[in-house]
Amino acid sequence: MKDRLFFDFSVNKETNSISIQREFAAALALVWDAWTQPEIIDKWWAPEGYECKTKSMEFKEGGLRLYLMRGPDDEAHWGINTYEKIQLHKGFSGKDCFTDENAVVIEEYPNSDYKITFIDKGNKTLIKHHTTYPSLEQLEASISYGFEEGMTMALEGLDRVLK
């Protein structure tokens, strides 16, 4: 019998938040690297049919990652992840925003705060990804844009990279 990996996706409209818990069949250090090194992130941080390319990244407190996701019809979607707090192999947090190619935030799109926690389970690693939006409207907009489907596909891509 194949060992199933834990996955949970939940939306809380009272707190305008989304929580994802996802287990990976890999050691903590490998999963950490996959989230913190641009050459690895670019291999999985996009839903199927999309390509991700990091333009710049400074994984340090106060740093950010500016990236492009190019869709199947050649449409370009820019975004940033800021890094506000980092605890090596434990987690990091910051903001996730839609931007233009110069990292200017596009306020018309949902922007959020995120916190990712890494839990060592021996030969597995559990990540807890918590995203909070400033309003219910932004949460619902993110869901309507396919947040759940996109994250599910991206995390499945991470599974493939970790193998």
Image (cartoon, helix red, strand yellow):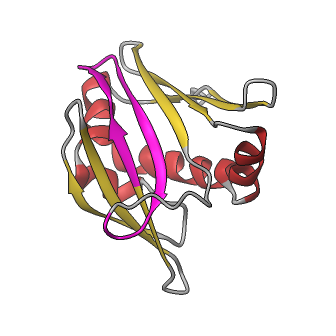
Q: Position of residue 49 (x, y in %)?
A: 53, 72
In the picture as drawn, the residue positioned furthest to the right comes out as 14
* Relative side of 45 to 149, left or right: left
Work out which quarter of the rendered image holds the C terminus and state it.
top left
Residue 144: quadrant of the picture: bottom right
Residue 43: quadrant of the picture: bottom left
Q: Nearer the viewer, residue 75 or 141?
A: 141
Query: Vertically, is 29 above or below 146?
Result: above
Residue shown at 19% from the left, 33% from the top: 60
SS majority, magenta = strand
Q: Position of residue 24 (x, y in %)?
A: 46, 31
* Relative side of 146 to 6, left or right: right
Work out which quarter of the rendered image holds the N terminus and state it.
top right
Residue shown at 73% from the left, 50% from the top: 143
* Relative side of 113 to 103, left or right: right
Indicate yes or no whether the magenta region holds residue 50.
no
Query: Looking at the image, can residue 157 be seen?
Result: yes
The boundaries of the magenta stretch are: 80-102
Q: Position of residue 149 (x, y in %)?
A: 67, 53
